[in-house]
Each structure stands twice: as structure tokens, then as C-alpha cells.
Image (cartoon, helix red, strand yellow):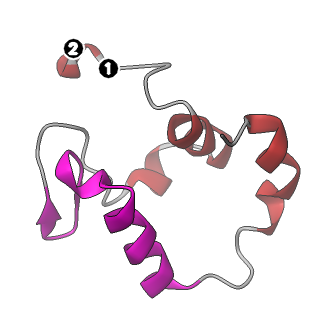
Amino acid sequence: QWKMDDILPKLGQVDRGRNFDKGKEAYAAAQCLKCHRFGESGGGVGPDLTAVSSRFARRDLLEATIEPSKVISEQYH
């Protein structure tokens, strides 16, 4: 069970050592694609994550990942 306090101190390091293939594997393993679209794949029940980093701050994205039900847009209720 990850908590915000576990990862927040490392948030400034996310630009280093990124691996797109590992990210895709994690996205699939966590079954995010069942509800969320990313590029040409995934579901349409949840928000499209294709350009999410241009719409939200890193802290907000982390919080949505750690606590996905904390804030739900009215269009997805």
C-alpha cells in the first residue's frame, strides 16, 4: 500500500531514468487500460490519459494514482 508520503519526496526525480516500455507494462498489469484510454488503446469508461501530464501537475497525478477514488469528475459518477 503506497502512500503519498512514501513517494512525494521523489517526485522531482521522475524525469530521470524513465522507461516507456516499463510504464506500459505497469499500466497493463494494474489494469488501468480497462477503464482509461492512452493513445489508441484502452477503455472509455474513465478519463483519457493520453495528454494528462499537460493538464495536471505531477503531485495531482501522483495523488490520483495512489488514491484514485479521492476525486472523481462529475462526468464519471
Amino acid at the residue labelled 2: His
Q: Position of residue 19 (x, y in %)?
A: 55, 85
**Do tag 1 and tag 2 residues touch (Cβ < 8 Å)?**
yes
Amino acid at the residue labelled 1: Ser
The residue that disc 1 covers is 73
| Label 2 packing within 10 angstroms: few (<14), some (14-19), many (20+) | few
* Residue found at the very far front of the displayed protein: 1
Magenta residues, start to end: 19-42
Residue at the image position 45 percent from the left and 19 percent from the top: 71
Q: Position of residue 16 (x, y in %)?
A: 75, 80
Q: Quadrant of the C terminus?
A: top left
Task: Label 2: state its secondary structure.
Answer: loop
Q: Quadrant of the N terminus?
A: top right
The residue that disc 2 covers is 77
Please give left or right for residue 70 compared with residue 75 in the image.
right
Residue at the image position 26 percent from the left and 13 percent from the top: 74
